[in-house]
Image: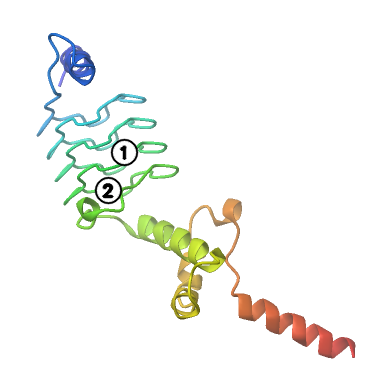
């Protein structure tokens, strides 16, 4: 798709979002947008079904409620993107940058094709949040502890901190206490 045509569609979509005359919902289904620069674009509610967005820059894009089912998002930059209520059914996210994005936790993302990096990232957040929460029960915390080694493979663990098992830290403290006596 030519940059001029894409810009025209985005302009009409903006009018549509604002309920202005001449507005039209963006229909970019099946479009080849590979490598497109859509940084900060407001694509909320847009139809991007089966669109090729591989290597596209969608950082800071508003994709709330967008239909991304079957879209190819491999190696796309989705950092800081808002994917709330986006339909990611069968979307290919292999190699996509999801750092700091708002990933939907609803059924529309359950059949998305995440890669190992994404799964580890999701597990890291779930384990760290669950173990640090005063509202998480001990049986759930015990199950989360089984995932610590995998969670610590998170690519940003050096910034967010390694997850240490609480019992290991307590045992180390007891051993140190016994050695000092």
- Provide the residue designation for mark 2: 93
Q: Residue at the spot x=17%, y=14% of the render?
A: 12
Q: Quadrant of residue 134?
A: bottom right
Secondary structure found at label 2: loop
76 or 98, nearer to the observer: 98
Classed neighbour count for the residue bearing mark 2: other residues with Cα under 10 Å, few (<14), some (14–19), many (≥20): many
Find the distance from the CA under tag 1 to the CA under tag 2. Answer: 8 Å
Q: Are marks 1 and 2 in contact (CB under 8 Å)?
A: yes
Q: Residue at the spot x=46%, y=58% of the render?
A: 125
64 or 113, nearer to the observer: 64
89 or 4, nearer to the observer: 89
Classed neighbour count for the residue bearing mark 1: other residues with Cα under 10 Å, few (<14), some (14–19), many (≥20): many
Position of the N terminus, as image quadrant, is top left
Secondary structure found at label 1: loop
Q: Residue at the spot x=64%, y=80% of the render?
A: 168
Q: Is residue 65 above or below residue 137?
A: above
Q: Is residue 154 left or right of residue 1?
A: right
Res 76 label = 1
Position of the C terminus, as image quadrant, is bottom right
Q: Is residue 177 left or right of residue 135?
A: right
What is the x, y in percent for residue 11? 21, 13
Q: Quadrant of residue 100?
A: top left
Q: Earlier in the sequence, mark 1 or mark 2?
A: 1
């Amino acid at each position: 798709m030519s940059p001029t045509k894409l810009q025209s569609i985005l302009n009409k979509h903006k009018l549509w979002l604002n309920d202005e005359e001449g507005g039209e919902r963006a229909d970019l289904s099946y479009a080849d947008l590979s490598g497109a620069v859509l940084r900060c674009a407001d694509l909320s509610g847009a139809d991007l079904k089966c669109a090729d967005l591989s290597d596209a820059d969608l950082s800071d894009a508003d994709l709330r409620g967008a239909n991304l089912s079957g879209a190819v998002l491999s190696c796309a930059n989705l950092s800081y993107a808002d994917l709330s209520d986006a339909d990611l059914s069968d979307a290919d996210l292999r190699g996509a940058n999801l750092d700091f994005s708002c990933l939907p936790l609803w059924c529309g993302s359950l059949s998305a094709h995440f890669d190992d990096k994404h799964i580890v990232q999701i597990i890291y957040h779930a384990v760290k949040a669950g173990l640090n929460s005063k509202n998480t029960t001990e049986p759930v915390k015990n199950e989360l502890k089984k995932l610590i080694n995998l969670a610590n493979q998170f690519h940003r663990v050096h910034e967010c901190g390694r997850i240490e098992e609480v019992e290991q830290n307590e045992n180390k403290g007891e051993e140190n206490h016994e050695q000092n006596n």
